[in-house]
Image (cartoon, coloured by chain):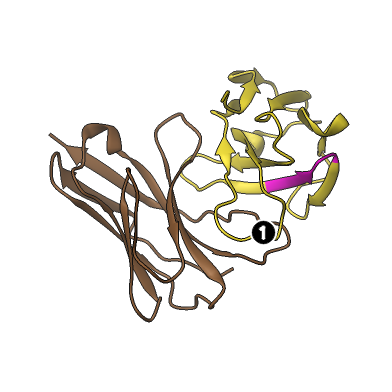
Amino acid sequence: DAKTTQPTSMDCAEGRAANLPCNHSTISGNEYVYWYRQIHSQGPQYIIHGLKNNETNEMASLIITEDRKSSTLILPHATLRDTAVYYCIARRITSNTGKLIFGQGTTLQVKP
Amino acid sequence: EAGVAQSPRYKIIEKRQSVAFWCNPISGHATLYWYQQILGQGPKLLIQFQNNGVVDDSQLPKDRFSAERLKGVDSTLKIQPAKLEDSAVYLCASSSVKSGAAANYGYTFGSGTRLTVV
């Protein structure tokens, strides 16, 4: 599975949109981009995933560039409860194991 | 639906002692994973089960770690003997989709067991 690169940390003001970037320049055509987050003292939580098209759900939006080398997770109106570590993962859909490989992630701090 | 249950929530042991962690996945989930998360790092996969068979244990330190999933439901992860560097949170996750299928695998994580080795 392709390696992903994320900034170590980011700040966001409460009520504003949080835009979390992820670089996956070596992603292959059959790899999805997944986003998970981990709130302090909890296990990781699934947010969203996509292959080529932009995706939106009740939690967030995922914008994937046309060349698929990078993506951005958007939390439209960040709240204090969105403070967490956010992981961007490239995952092959034909993987024999289906495992998630986590990197260091981005620590998002939402400030009042 | 009930989530992934793990116990104990916290455990403190001395080095060279043994310890066991228990995981009860979501009912009907065939795939179960154990991850180790050291402070400040992302979770690292230790072992994956499909029903009661091991799919991937390439990252499991087999000289001291062992895991089993009898009857394809509950799972136990054991460390014997523990070392200081085993201090971490041990996360269990389960999935409802068989390996190799497309789209979201439906991973659900438990809250983990925080192990401190002194």
Of B8 and A47, nearer the camera is A47
For the residue labelled by badge 1, is the local secondary structure a helix, a strand or a loop?
loop
Q: Where is residue A23 in the image (x, y as percent from the top left)?
A: 38, 70
Q: Which chain is brown?
A: A
Residue A26 vs residue A66: left or right?
right
Amino acid at dot 1: Ala
Of B77 and B99, nearer the camera is B99
Q: Where is residue A108 in the image (x, y as percent from the top left)?
A: 29, 46
Color used for chain B? yellow
Q: Position of residue B114 (x, y in %)?
A: 57, 26
Residue A90 vs residue B97: left or right?
left
Can residue B118 be seen here? no
Q: Mark 1 points at which residue?
A: B101
- Which residue: 17% across, 50% down? A17
- Which residue: 13% across, 40% down? A15
Q: In which quarter of the image is residue B70?
A: top right
Image height of B55 relative to B89, above or below: below
Can residue B37 be seen here? yes
The chain under label 1 reads B
Q: Total of numbered circles in the picture?
A: 1
- Which residue: 45% across, 57% down? A49
* Residue B51, magenta (yes or no): yes
* Residue A90, magenta (yes or no): no
Of B43 and A81, nearer the camera is A81
Q: Residue furthest bottom?
A: A67
Quadrant position of the N terminus of chain B in the picture: top right
Q: In which quarter of the image is residue A20?
A: bottom left
Q: What stretch is highlighted in magenta?
A: B46-52
